[in-house]
Image (spheres, rainbow, N blue to C red):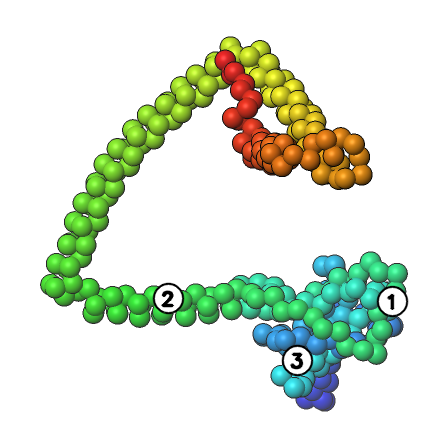
Amino acid sequence: MSGKNLELRVGLVIFLALIILGYGVIWLKDYKFNVKRFHYAAIFPEVGSLGIGDPVAVLGVTKGEVEKIDLKGGEVYVTFNLTKDVILKKDAEFTVMNIGLMGERFIRIKPGISDTLLDLTVPKRGFYDTGIPEVMGMMGRGIDEIRELIRILKGTIGTEQATTDMKEIISNTVELTRRTKSLMDSIKAGLMLSTKNLAYSSAKIREIVDSNQAGLQRTITNMDSASYRFLYLTDELTEISGNLKTISNRLLSDDNTLGKMLKDRELYDRLNTTTVNLDSLILDIKRNPKKYIHLEIF
């Protein structure tokens, strides 16, 4: 009888232990009974160490967990569930994030602010955030590359000839720097002198212009007046030349008394020569006005 009581007690303890274990698992998973959930899939370029059962957080609050991870055509399809109180908009963002130093992952969701709801039947592309493990891996590869570079440099410049060449290069660089500095100093002095001379010349020109401003104005006025008179004189000479041509033609005609009186050949030649000379004079005035009009500038 005592053996049966012992077996009963052991079974009861094991049963209670299983109940406590199940409740602990449920508590650790933060699982809630009678909570309605929906399922959604997102596409990521990679997911790192993300695994089934990892949390899905909306604005930092855990609202679901990863259910399935599939590789399709070089991309990762992740299916997860979310509680019904989560409302996803069209501009929602999904990112695989790093949790801690050990490389744990979770899916972070920003629900969005658009006026249009997200179509839950179409997977949306998400982002992958590089975590500490990836950074450490890249640092490790970088250190290996630095070591390889140091090894190559040692093999290249670690010889006596390389050391001698480096010393010569440094010496030449120092000498080049010294000469450059000396050249720049001399150029600087020349530039300063040129600047001073230019400033002095500008001041003198300004002084001359200011002191003779009235004379310059008179000169400009005289030039305008002379140009006007020259144009008037040219027009008058052109009119005179035309009149002389008309008179000459009439004198050559036998239809008038004056023409008959002046039929003398010598008088005709003189009038004709005068007309030609007058035309030449007008043409020369137009081409060389400075020969006939003189302007005095102070």
Q: Separation of disc 2 and disc 1 at Cα?
A: 47 Å
Expressed as whole percent of the image width and height from the top left, the position of residue 60 reads 72, 59
Q: Nearer the viewer, residue 280 or 244?
A: 244
Q: Is residue 15 above or below residue 232?
A: below
Label 1, secondary structure: give it.
Answer: loop
Instruction: Specify the amino acid type for callout 1.
Output: Leu
Disc 3 target residue: 76
Toward which corner of the image does residue 168 lie, by quadrant?
A: bottom left
Residue on which disc 1 sits: 117
Q: Is residue 252 visible?
A: yes
The answer to whether any part of residue 35 appears in the image is: no
Q: Which residue does the image show at 40% across and 67% down from the upper left?
A: 142
| Residue 171, x across and y down, in percent | 16, 49
Residue type at numbered disc 3: Val
Q: Is residue 62 left or right of residue 86?
A: left
Q: Is residue 158 left or right of residue 262?
A: left
- The quarter holding residue 99 reads bottom right
| Mark earlier in primary sequence (3, 1) | 3
Compare marks 3 and 2 and give the one earlier in the sequence. Answer: 3
Q: Which image quarter is the N terminus in?
A: bottom right
Give the residue number, with chain letter if any, for mark 2.
143
Q: Position of residue 141 (x, y in %)?
A: 41, 70
**Mark 3 crowd level (few <14, some 14–19, many ≥20, 10 Å Cα):** some
Residue toward you, 212 or 266: 266
Mark 3 and mark 2: span between their CA atoms? 30 Å
Amino acid type of the residue that numbered disc 2 sits on in the rendered structure:
Ile
